[in-house]
Image (tube, grey):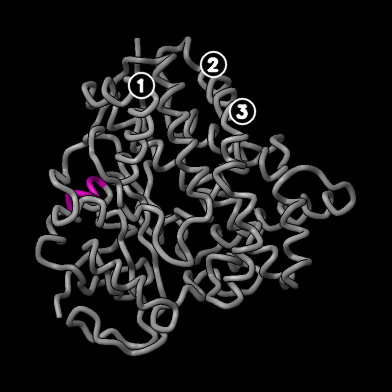
């Protein structure tokens, strides 16, 4: 049983270059035991190879459950609704939510995504530089999805800060979990206040739709609140991470930037290549039944991580896996996961990424990273970049 020293939240080498670490491990270990593994010192199983991860998803919730993914969310008022449910409860709720995340609905929002991208870029373009993560990535995706949820934009800066604290604080920053808990509480209060307002005066937005879904599926108050929190965090945090990795790549690789913006199909292909080569998801599951999994004795009560961020660079699946190629013929990546818990917002994420590639390069076609050595990722279940200064002077 291979055991390796790796903390997905705080390992300095991992945060500096997560895909370099995955590349070294994946060659020899499709699954390994990470110690300490988590900020709490818990050892965890980590799957790195595409086929191993697919096999894990195929075993399903009878072995690997989504229940209570995050120990610090264990109180009912801090649970994340849909993502921390298993079938059959999960099945009915997801089916009811799916129409509001369909390709047709997303396409109806695309023009507005373009407008928002232009508005955000207009706030700093004349300066000739920006801190990309805070000034563009977070504000762009927040404006899109908060509008869709029906959340007022008056507290945008606070909202962005709450999202970071709820997901990305390290144990060094928040040793007792109090800041994370406070942020989750603030998000919960905000979303429930929006829901109360929509009960009084329904609107054409996702929160109004979720109120009807909750009634139709007899969703508990706790799971209703948790699902609203999940939508809030998913809409604000995950896509911002993908966009930030994309911006760094294009800033450092001008030939790829040119290829990605050649035409509409190139934009779409480039978005898929970003998702494949800069996957951000390390999906955590709770083991609920003993199983011999790829030669390892995985026990009930263990936690297991399916690193789709690693799987996207698996050379057994993708020829020239370390190369960014807009002309790839197949994109069978698993960046959004697999099975019942595949990301329900994947169509939104794709569209937001495509619109970023189009609008950013229309306005800022040439740019570079300021001080590349200062760029660090954050790890954990959803990876991203903390700071990324870009210049186009």
Q: Which residue is mark 1?
A: 263
Occupied quadrant, residue 158: top right
The residue that disc 2 covers is: 122
Mark 2 Cα shell of 10 Å, populated few (<14), some (14-19), many (≥20): few
Q: Mark 3 falls on what kind of element?
A: helix
Residue at point 29%, 67% (across, down): 53
State how many labels appear: 3
The residue positioned farthest toward the right in the image shown: 200
Could you tell me which secondary element the residue under label 2 belongs to?
helix
Please, what secondary structure does the residue beneath circle 1 have?
Answer: loop
Point 44% across, 35% down: residue? 353
Crowding at label 3, few (<14), some or many (≥20) Cα neighbours within 10 Å?
few
Name which of mark 1 and mark 3 comes first in the sequence. Answer: 3
Q: Quadrant of the C terminus?
A: top left
Measured along the vertical axis of the image, is residue 321 above or below residue 380?
Answer: above
- From the top left corner, tell me how far across and down residue 154 is, in percent: 71, 35
Q: Which residues are magenta?
A: 16-21
Residue wearing tag 3: 112
């Amino acid at each position: 049983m291979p055991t390796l020293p790796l903390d997905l939240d705080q390992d300095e080498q991992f945060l500096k270059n997560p895909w370099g670490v995955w590349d070294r491990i994946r060659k020899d270990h499709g699954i390994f035991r990470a110690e300490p593994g988590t900020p709490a010192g818990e050892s965890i199983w980590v799957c790195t190879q595409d086929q191993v991860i697919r096999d894990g998803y195929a075993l399903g919730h009878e072995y690997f459950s989504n229940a209570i993914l995050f120990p610090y969310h264990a109180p009912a008022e801090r649970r994340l609704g849909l993502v921390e449910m298993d079938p059959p409860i999960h099945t009915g709720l997801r089916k009811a939510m799916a129409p509001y995340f369909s390709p047709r609905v997303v396409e109806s929002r695309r023009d507005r995504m373009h407008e928002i991208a232009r508005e955000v870029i207009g706030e700093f373009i004349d300066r000739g530089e920006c801190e990309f993560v805070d000034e563009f990535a977070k504000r762009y995706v927040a404006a899109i999805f908060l509008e869709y949820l029906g959340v007022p934009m008056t507290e945008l800066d606070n909202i962005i800060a709450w999202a970071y604290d709820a997901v990305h604080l390290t144990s060094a920053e928040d040793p007792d979990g109090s800041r994370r808990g406070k942020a989750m509480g603030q998000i919960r209060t905000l979303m429930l206040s929006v829901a109360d307002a929509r009960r009084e005066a329904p609107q054409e937005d996702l929160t109004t739709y979720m109120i009807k879904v909750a009634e139709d599926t007899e969703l508990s108050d706790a799971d209703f609140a948790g699902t609203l929190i999940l939508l809030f965090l998913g809409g604000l945090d995950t896509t911002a991470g993908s966009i930030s990795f994309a911006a760094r790549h294009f800033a450092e690789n001008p030939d790829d930037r040119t290829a990605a913006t050649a035409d509409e199909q190139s934009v779409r292909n480039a978005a898929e290549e970003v998702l494949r080569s800069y996957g951000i998801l390390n999906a955590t599951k709770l083991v609920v039944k003993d199983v011999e999994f790829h030669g390892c004795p995985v026990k009930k009560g263990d936690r297991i991580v399916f690193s789709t961020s690693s799987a996207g660079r698996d050379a057994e699946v993708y020829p020239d896996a370390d190369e960014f190629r807009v002309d790839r013929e197949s994109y069978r990546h698993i960046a959004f996961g697999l099975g019942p818990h595949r990301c329900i917002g994947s169509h939104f994420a794709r569209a937001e990424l495509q619109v970023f590639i189009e609008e950013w390069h229309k306005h800022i076609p040439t740019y570079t990273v300021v001080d590349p050595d200062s760029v660090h990722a954050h790890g954990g279940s959803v990876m991203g970049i903390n700071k990324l200064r870009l210049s186009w002077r």
